[in-house]
Amino acid sequence: MIRVGLIVVLVAVFAAVVGPTLTPYDPAAQELARRLEGPSLAHPFGLDELGRDILSRLLSGARISLLVGLAVVSVSSFFGMFLGSIAGYFGGVVDDAVSRVVDVLMAFPGILLAIALVAVLGPSLTNVVLALSIIGWVGYARLVRSQALRAREFEFVQAARALGAGAPRILVRHVLPTALPAVVVQATLGMAGAIIAEASLSFLGLGVQPPTPSWGTMLDAGRSHLFDAPHLTIFPGLAIAILVLGFNFLGDGLRDRVDPKLAR
Amino acid sequence: MLRYLIRRLLLTIPVLLGVATLVFALIHLVPGDPAQSMLGEGASSEEVAQLRHSLGLDRPLLTQYRTFMVGLVKGDLGLSFRYGTPVTREIRDRLFRTMQLAVAAMGVAILIAIPLGIAAAVFRGTAIDHAAMTLALAGISMPNFWLGPLLAILFAVYLGWLPVSGTGGPANLVLPAVTLGAALAAILARMTRASLLEELRELYVLAARARGLSRLRAVVRHAFRNSLIPVVTIIGLQFGAVLTGTIITETIFAWPGVGRLLIQAINFRDYPLVQGCILFISLTYVMMNLITDLTYGILDPRIRYD
């Protein structure tokens, strides 16, 4: 499972990095006379509603999906680890404050809060990353907090404290490394979540704005052509599903490695 | 039980307050002036000032907050900018459709997932198990904004069996309900399988078998009921996901519910209505989680609340 996931993710990364230079078509180049044309040898995935090559746009869209995923996971894991570790390590008021904010943010279902934030901040790539990070850090914070709570009782942590190490050093050198494997698993699954969330927001018109190719906006455009050009819907959706499945496989596989008790 | 109930209810209050405060803060996150943003660039300064006044944005923040909270308790969420009608009425008018869709989706999910999960557990390691779990994995990985259009292409465009949008009759509900319920069905099937497998290892199942009960009877009469506890929890906890899912599903199938209302409100920059819809969905979610917590005990007499 982990191998399948890794292959899918590596192929996607390769396609995103190198792909756009390999296709002969500019993802923005329009051929209006051939709009909505189905798959052919020259255009394996067909042309979209403005006569643009769908394969080229999918490859460019992969960059957006992976970049958004990477940005969201990096920002949210950084803040989540920071807040979670200080909450768990110091306890008391700090813990109470962080935990209450976590409780409130957890009370919002799914990406509702992200929709709300993008709705008021305005649709853009930056705001999508910002909104998804604002809801994303919570998961990491909970995870790291529970690890930090346990870690502060470990003898090596107490030894470091007895030797006069300061809190920042103990957190970075001793507490966070114990949480890191779980964070890596969460981040891998988080990539899948962020990719779906970005596509959902773009699908609703709240994410990446045209003409930038995003898998979500491509699916949104396909909605008006279900009857006459279903390929507009089929290929972007397939790309999302495969990449998400890849990250889920990878994340599940890593989790089984990190915690063999969870392996089914 | 009563003590637990009161404690659990008291613990919900700060969360509800936090959610309401965050939703109140949303309108103040609008870059620049929300009134200007709602009216567009072409609006005169008098029009902007008038809207600011009618939205109460010209009053001190704390006063606005107090008015918002008092209104919330009274069920008054202000007036929709677009329709000029109370936000609560707009939501109430569409509530039935959203609940109809959510309940139908959960029904579809349960109908698919429970037999699938039981079959996978009972026939563990066989082709049935593999087929069921592959189907479940596909359901989890398939975003509903893709599944919906795919189902529409197949059943409405090619086969012509079902309508693609609208609310005419029960047939209109099928595609949206399956689209919305698929992911939940996948999660529930996996959970049912895992939970039932765990119960099947318990001694009381072995004892039932030793007393001469057939495998099927031991599963249905004994193991299944206990295995339902995590399944019911997931159903309850996933209600929020279903409710959020209505936003996309209603948009795909032009289903006139609260989710579609939210997206329309966002497009019209009708911030009071956006606030109202977000608040409604999140408060329903918090309350559903509370109800889920409280239902544990009814299903599992082993759980005691004090």
Image (cartoon, coloured by chain):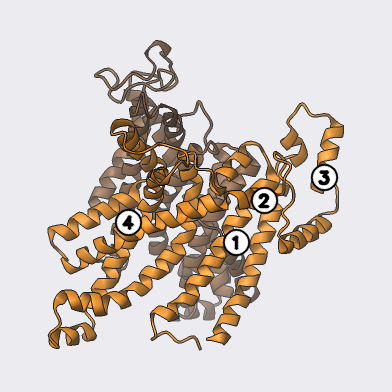
Chain colours: A brown, B orange
For disc 3, the marked residue is: B54
Chain containing mark 1: B
Dot 1, how many residues are within 10 Å of its Cα: few (below 14), some (14-19), or many (20+)?
many
User: Is residue A77 in view?
Assistant: yes
Query: In this view of the protein, which residue sits in the foreground, A62 or B65?
Result: B65
Tell me whether the residue at label 4 lies in contact with that at label 3, contact meaning CB atoms closer than 8 angstroms: no
Mark sitting earlier along the chain (2/4): 2
Q: CA distance from mark 4 to mark 3?
A: 47 Å
Q: Which numbered dot is residue B89?
A: 2
Mark sitting earlier along the chain (2/3): 3
Residue B175 locus on image (x, y percent): 38, 44
User: Do dots 2 and 3 share one subunit?
Assistant: yes
Chain containing mark 4: B
Q: Which numbered dot is residue B218?
A: none
Mark sitting earlier along the chain (2/1): 2
Residue A50 locus on image (x, y percent): 44, 19
Q: CA distance from mark 1 to mark 3?
A: 26 Å
Mark sitting earlier along the chain (1/3): 3
For disc 1, the marked residue is: B283
A82 lies above or below B10? above
- Quarter holding the N terminus of chain A? bottom left
A30 lies above or below B191? above
For disc 4, the marked residue is: B186
Query: In this view of the protein, which residue sits in the foreground, B277 or B143?
Result: B277
Dot 2, how many residues are within 10 Å of its Cα: few (below 14), some (14-19), or many (20+)?
some
Give the residue type at disc 4. Ala
Where disc 3 sits, the SS reads: helix
Tell me whether the residue at label 2 lies in contact with that at label 3, contact meaning CB atoms closer than 8 angstroms: no
Residue B263 locus on image (x, y percent): 57, 41
